[in-house]
Amino acid sequence: MKNIDLQTTIQQVLRKYPFTQKFFSSKNMYCNICACKKHETIYYAAVNYGHDPEQFLQELKDFIKNNEKGKSS
């Protein structure tokens, strides 16, 4: 989780943390089925959906921290 930043792609997040699909869906972002996930960064995804990128990143990291089971990052 520590290595996730604004330049991380959505696909990289979903591959490492598949359960984040629920986070993106809660933001009305259907990243798991979008072809853009391969190259779209967290920064651009946040901006495109009207979210503050820094706040969005922090919420994503908090979601991962609170939902990851049995792993330490």
Image (cartoon, rainbow, N blue to C red):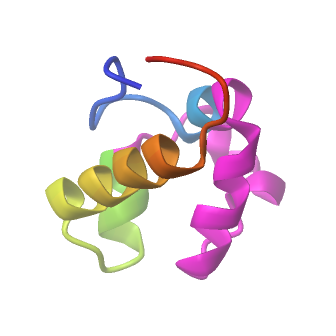
Relative placement, left or right, of 17 versus 53 is right
Vertical position of residue 6 compared to residue 34: above or below: above
- Give the residue at the far right of this rendering: 33
Q: Position of residue 12 (x, y in %)?
A: 59, 26
Residue lying at 47% horizontally and 54% vertically, measured from the top left: 63
Q: Quadrant of residue 29?
A: bottom right
Residue lying at 30% horizontally and 61% vertically, measured from the top left: 56
Vertical position of residue 9 compared to residue 73: above or below: below
Q: Position of residue 45 (x, y in %)?
A: 43, 58
Residue lying at 59% horizontally and 65% vertically, measured from the top left: 24
Q: Position of residue 26 (x, y in %)?
A: 60, 78
Q: Quadrant of the N terminus?
A: top left
Vertical position of residue 23 compared to residue 27: above or below: above
Residue lying at 34% horizontally and 17% vertically, measured from the top left: 3
- The secondary structure that dominates the magenta segment is helix
- Give the residue at the far front of this rendering: 70
Q: Position of residue 60 (x, y in %)?
A: 41, 53
Query: Is residue 23 located in the magenta-colored stretch of the structure?
Result: yes
- Segment tinted magenta in the rendering: 14-42
Q: Quadrant of the C terminus?
A: top left
Foreground of the two, 9 or 17: 17
